[in-house]
């Protein structure tokens, strides 16, 4: 009954939120994207004149204010359908969530197939769905190369993490790490690490959600962050792992149908001829111009250089091989140390099912990232990189624009429907990912800190579930508050940070706990502390942060170029004039400014800390364990090893 | 927790267990290393030998594109092969061992 009242309350709250959001709807849905091919060509003129700094920096592409304009009525009704279906799932799940095992692991009653879809749903974020196809549409093959990392993540999980963890663990990262160590300090450190990693990831998702809804539907940033926050809290507080799992399964299903459909339409449009498709891309004059002028900045074409073919060659976006290796390490090991992914293994009854679920997740993921490549290249060919970057500099709107085009174009019913569907998919994606994160963070606080540290493991089922629900509520509220506060922040660094911390701290700690006899309390604590702190420090002093001085310098370059032109007697075009004014302002605002930690320029040259922080975390773990030997931990290794290899004494739903 | 307690160190000496442990270790870490070498060869080759990636193989489709595609195929192959071996050998050995102990 308690559940029902609260769910009704939540629904009302949500409806009000959407009601408020719908208020400032004055834009006519007809005012679609100027998809005529002539518009983007003119846009470039301004780009060549201004010496744009690095590709990733705010390239001064001004001109036609193009925008994606979904049909609000259709889109919001699709959102409401998703919300409605998921709320039904929550109410159904809430009824069967009685014990702590129900809350954290759905009683271990999820099948391998279901869990595989849920893991995929937990892992594939809106950033990959929208961002990666955008990268491909702007930088060609480099974007596709970028997709290999998140696909490969599942190999380490499959081979060395999933089954041993399932056999040796119970609910959380703390359970795995505290098995043969001093439980209280280890659980405390593991909980801090879990909460840190999950909150970083969570804030990045919340800010992304807020900005996406703002761009797409004119819903104010605050309203969408609160709306998403209320929903995720509702899913987790009432439905626990069962509801979260089904929200993730639904999301993965929606995401895959959207992706398959889009990719199929691209393939159909190309006449089912992959070689012809890529020949068209290489021969496309707009792509050639984009590569020449916007990416390589060759004002005059180099004679005999094939700019179209260059789109199919590496180095347009990923420029530093060491940075790529560093990022590769974070993908390869980081996902295996993410607490919200680790937690999913405990929802299945056996190691065999855990294995099956990872294999299924790997299949879904590989298919997804393969199809994203078709969508990205399709967007480049059928929309043109100029149009895509004029709507969003990072290319994040490529998937949405392509859906609109292939559905029948802006303003057509098909175009509106398909665009609305893809928006709804992105929305569901955000909901599913944030729910998993809230659950993982609150499990660490409620199960590790409260039940096992404060209460010495002596809490009855009723109390455990109650505490877990209250914790989820507070974690969710904290995420909403931080999401609101981080509106203007550069959150790209946060996801990289979450992966780097997981790869440098959690991954070595989990691996050595499972496979190294001498590993002990000191080792775990050293791994988590050194891994986390080194990854954090390196990111904070890396080029990922915002450096006002650099913005000022870049603005100054533009100002001086344009002023020189003026001195030569050239009358500046309207948009160049605007650019000049904007750059002057940027210069004044940012000159002399420093980054968050008071730096004028980055100290660490790489965007990704993995190549340094992972070895540091690993060395710290080994040194810590060797310096403080622990006989008990060594004697208990037989038990850990037998358990993780055979699954004897496995923690089952009925056990606790 | 209401479960039978096992003599862990005795099981740890069981020849069947030792065989299972050795087989699993060799297979899992072996394939993990192989897959990782293949995976890291992508950023290394594309970064330090970009000319290799530019070789056109099928029409305009070059080595680079096909190499990236092969990453997906290798990952799927490793997953499928592991599933096969695990279902055929590891699960059977584990079942035999567990039956012997209980």
Image (cartoon, rainbow, N blue to C red):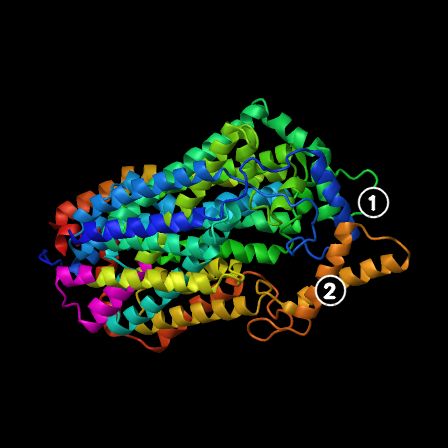
Classify residue A85 as left or right of residue A28: left
Camera sees residue A355: no
Instruction: Check if mark 1 and mark 2 are on a common chain.
Output: yes
Point out residue A183 in the picture as x, y percentages from the top left corner: 24, 70
Chain assignment, label 1: A
Give the residue pinned by disc 2. Answer: A584
Compared to residue A106, the image places residue A380 above or below, namely: above
Judged from the image, the secondary structure of the residue bearing numbered disc 2 is helix
Give the residue pinned by disc 1. Answer: A300
Relative depth, front residue between A431 and A72: A72
Classify residue A181 as left or right of residue A99: right
Q: Is residue A441 magenta?
A: yes
Compared to residue B64, the image places residue A240 above or below, namely: below
> Disc 1 and disc 2: Cα gap in Å?
28 Å
Point out residue A13 in the picture as x, y percentages from the top left corner: 32, 52
Magenta stretch bounds: A440-466
Farthest residue, direction top: A271
Chain assignment, label 2: A
Point out residue A326 in the picture as x, y percentages from the top left corner: 54, 58
Judged from the image, the secondary structure of the residue bearing numbered disc 1 is loop
Relative depth, front residue between B95 and A460: A460
């Amino acid at each position: 009954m308690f559940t029902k009242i609260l769910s009704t309350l939540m629904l009302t709250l949500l409806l009000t939120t959407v009601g408020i959001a719908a208020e400032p709807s004055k834009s006519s849905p007809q005012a679609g994207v100027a998809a005529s091919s002539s518009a983007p060509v003119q846009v470039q003129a301004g780009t060549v004149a201004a010496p744009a700094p690095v590709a990733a920096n705010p390239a001064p592409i001004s001109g036609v204010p193009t925008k994606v304009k979904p049909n609000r009525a259709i889109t919001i009704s699709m959102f409401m359908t998703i919300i409605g279906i998921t709320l039904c799932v929550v109410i159904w799940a809430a009824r069967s969530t009685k014990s702590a095992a129900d809350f954290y692991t759905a009683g271990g009653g999820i099948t391998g197939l279901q869990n595989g879809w849920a893991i995929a749903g937990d892992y594939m974020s809106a950033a990959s769905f929208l961002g990666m196809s955008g990268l491909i549409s702007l930088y060609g093959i480099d974007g596709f190369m970028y997709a290999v990392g998140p696909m490969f993540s599942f190999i380490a999980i499959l081979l060395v993490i999933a089954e041993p963890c399932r056999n040796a663990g119970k609910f959380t990262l703390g359970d795995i790490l505290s098995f043969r160590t001093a439980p209280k300090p280890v659980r405390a450190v593991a909980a801090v690490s879990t909460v840190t990693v999950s909150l970083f990831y969570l804030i990045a998702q919340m800010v992304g959600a807020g900005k996406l809804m703002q761009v797409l539907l004119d819903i104010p940033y605050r309203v969408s962050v609160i709306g998403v926050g209320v929903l995720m809290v509702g899913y987790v507080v009432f439905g626990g792992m069962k509801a979260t799992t089904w929200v993730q399964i639904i999301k993965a299903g929606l995401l895959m149908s959207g992706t398959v459909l889009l990719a199929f339409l691209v393939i159909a449009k190309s006449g089912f001829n992959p070689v012809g498709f890529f020949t068209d891309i290489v021969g496309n004059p707009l792509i050639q111009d984009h590569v020449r002028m916007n990416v390589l900045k060759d004002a005059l074409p180099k004679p005999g250089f094939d700019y179209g073919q260059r789109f199919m060659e590496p180095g347009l976006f990923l420029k530093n091989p060491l940075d790529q290796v560093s990022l590769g390490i974070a993908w390869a090991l980081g996902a295996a140390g993410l607490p919200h992914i680790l937690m999913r293994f405990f929802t299945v009854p056996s190691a065999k099912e855990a294995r099956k679920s990872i294999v299924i997740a790997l299949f879904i993921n590989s298919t997804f990232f393969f199809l994203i490549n078709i969508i990205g290249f399709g967007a480049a060919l059928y929309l043109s990189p100029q149009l895509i970057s004029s709507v969003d500099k990072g290319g994040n709107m490529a998937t949405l624009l392509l859906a609109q085009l292939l559905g029948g174009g802006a303003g057509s019913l098909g175009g509106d429907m398909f665009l609305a569907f893809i928006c709804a998919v992105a929305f569901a994606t955000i909901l599913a990912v944030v729910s998993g994160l809230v659950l993982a963070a609150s499990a660490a606080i409620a199960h590790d800190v409260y039940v096992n540290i404060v209460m010495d493991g002596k809490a009855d089922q009723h109390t455990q579930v109650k505490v877990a629900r209250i914790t989820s509520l507070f974690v969710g509220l904290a995420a909403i508050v931080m999401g609101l506060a981080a509106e203007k922040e550069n959150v790209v660094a946060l996801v990289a940070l979450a992966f780097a911390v997981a790869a440098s701290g959690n991954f070595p700690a989990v691996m050595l706990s499972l496979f190294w006899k001498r590993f002990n309390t000191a080792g775990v604590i050293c791994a988590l502390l050194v891994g986390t702190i080194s990854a954090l420090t390196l990111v904070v002093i890396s080029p990922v942060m915002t450096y006002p001085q650099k913005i000022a310098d870049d603005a100054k370059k533009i100002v001086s170029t344009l002023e020189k032109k003026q001195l030569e007697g050239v009358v500046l075009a309207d948009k160049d004039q605007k650019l000049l004014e904007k750059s002057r302002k940027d210069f004044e605002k940012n000159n002399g400014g420093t980054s968050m930690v008071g730096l004028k320029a980055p100290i660490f040259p790489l965007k990704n800390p993995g190549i340094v922080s992972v070895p540091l975390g690993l060395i710290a773990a080994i040194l810590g364990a060797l310096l403080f030997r622990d006989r008990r931990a060594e004697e208990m290794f037989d038990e850990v090893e037998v358990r993780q290899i055979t699954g004897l004494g496995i923690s089952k739903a009925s056990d606790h | 927790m209401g479960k039978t307690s096992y003599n862990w160190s005795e099981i740890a000496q069981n020849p069947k267990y030792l065989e299972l442990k050795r087989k699993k270790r060799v297979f899992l870490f072996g394939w993990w290393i192989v897959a990782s070498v293949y995976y890291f060869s992508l950023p290394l080759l594309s970064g330090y030998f970009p000319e290799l990636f530019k070789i056109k193989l099928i029409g305009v489709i070059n080595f680079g594109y096909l190499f990236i595609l092969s990453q997906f195929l290798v990952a799927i192959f490793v997953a499928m092969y592991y599933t096969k071996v695990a279902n055929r050998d590891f699960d059977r050995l584990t079942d035999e061992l567990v039956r012997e102990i209980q």
